[in-house]
Image (cartoon, helix red, strand yellow):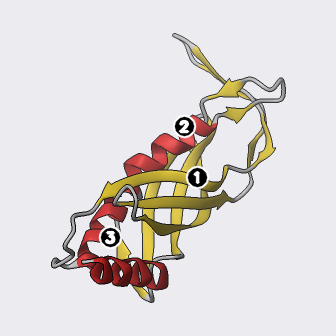
């Protein structure tokens, strides 16, 4: 049983220490005008055999996003978009998920790891992380940039799978 777990640990480190992914997202640039940007990231898995968990951590850096101050007026109301000075969304060694594994490891461990990754890295969870980051205006106040994740592509060792 210890040999199985050690083999699992070794394989997870060998195959899933750095899995790259790309994000395409939009943010509000002006009234009815969204701008597209990209973010590149990777996640890695480590095995904590004391707690029998697989722990996922993520790195992510977005393109620089920015927008000028703009205002749109209509008969009923006006919409103001605060200026966003140039900035990136960045996460380094950010813990995103913990997944408990069963011993003995007599199941498809790769599918287990990939299913855990799919629940940790998807458009919904990354969108929530982008909101959590907090885009700041020129007075260092948080503003809503109306970020929407439009595409997420994970590179599983050369074979791309879209999530």
Ranked by sequence position, the earlier of labels 2 and 3 is: 3
First in sequence, mark 3 or 1: give its number. 1
Residue toward you, 46 or 140? 46
Residue 1 relative to residue 134: left or right: left
Which numbered dot is residue 150? Answer: none
Q: CA distance from mark 1 to mark 2?
A: 15 Å
Q: Please say if 110 is above or below 35.
A: below
Using the rendered view, name the quadrant where residue 135 is placed: top right
Q: Nearer the viewer, mark 2 or mark 3?
A: 3
In percent of width and height, residue 26 lies at 55, 50
Left or right of 8 on screen, residue 146: right
Q: Residue furthest front?
A: 2
Q: Residue at x 73, y 50 (%)?
A: 88
Q: Which residue is mark 2?
A: 131
On residue 94, which mark appears?
A: 1
Q: SS for tag 3?
A: helix
Q: Which residue is mark 3?
A: 113
Give the residue at x 21% y 75%.
105
- Please, what secondary structure does the residue beneath circle 2 have? helix
Q: Where is residue 80 drawn, in percent x and y?
A: 66, 22
Please determine whether, in this image, residue 24 is positioned above or below residue 104: above
Residue at screen point 53% across, 55% down:
25
Residue 121 percent coordinates (x, y): 41, 58
């Amino acid at each position: 049983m210890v040999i199985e777990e050690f083999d699992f640990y070794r394989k997870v480190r060998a195959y899933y220490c750095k899995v790259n992914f790309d994000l395409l997202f939009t943010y509000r640039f002006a009234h009815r005008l969204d701008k597209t940007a990209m973010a590149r990231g990777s996640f890695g898995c480590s095995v904590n055999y004391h707690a029998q968990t697989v722990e996922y951590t993520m790195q992510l850096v977005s393109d620089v996003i920015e927008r000028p101050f703009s205002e749109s007026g209509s008969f009923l109301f006006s919409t103001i978009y605060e200026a966003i000075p140039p900035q990136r969304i960045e996460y380094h060694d950010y813990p995103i998920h913990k997944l408990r594994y069963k011993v003995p490891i007599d199941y498809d461990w790769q599918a287990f790891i990939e299913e855990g990754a799919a629940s940790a890295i998807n458009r919904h969870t990354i969108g929530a992380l982008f909101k959590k980051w907090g885009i700041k205006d020129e007075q260092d106040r948080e503003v809503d940039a109306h970020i929407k994740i439009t595409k997420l592509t994970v590179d599983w060792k050369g074979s791309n799978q879209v999530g």
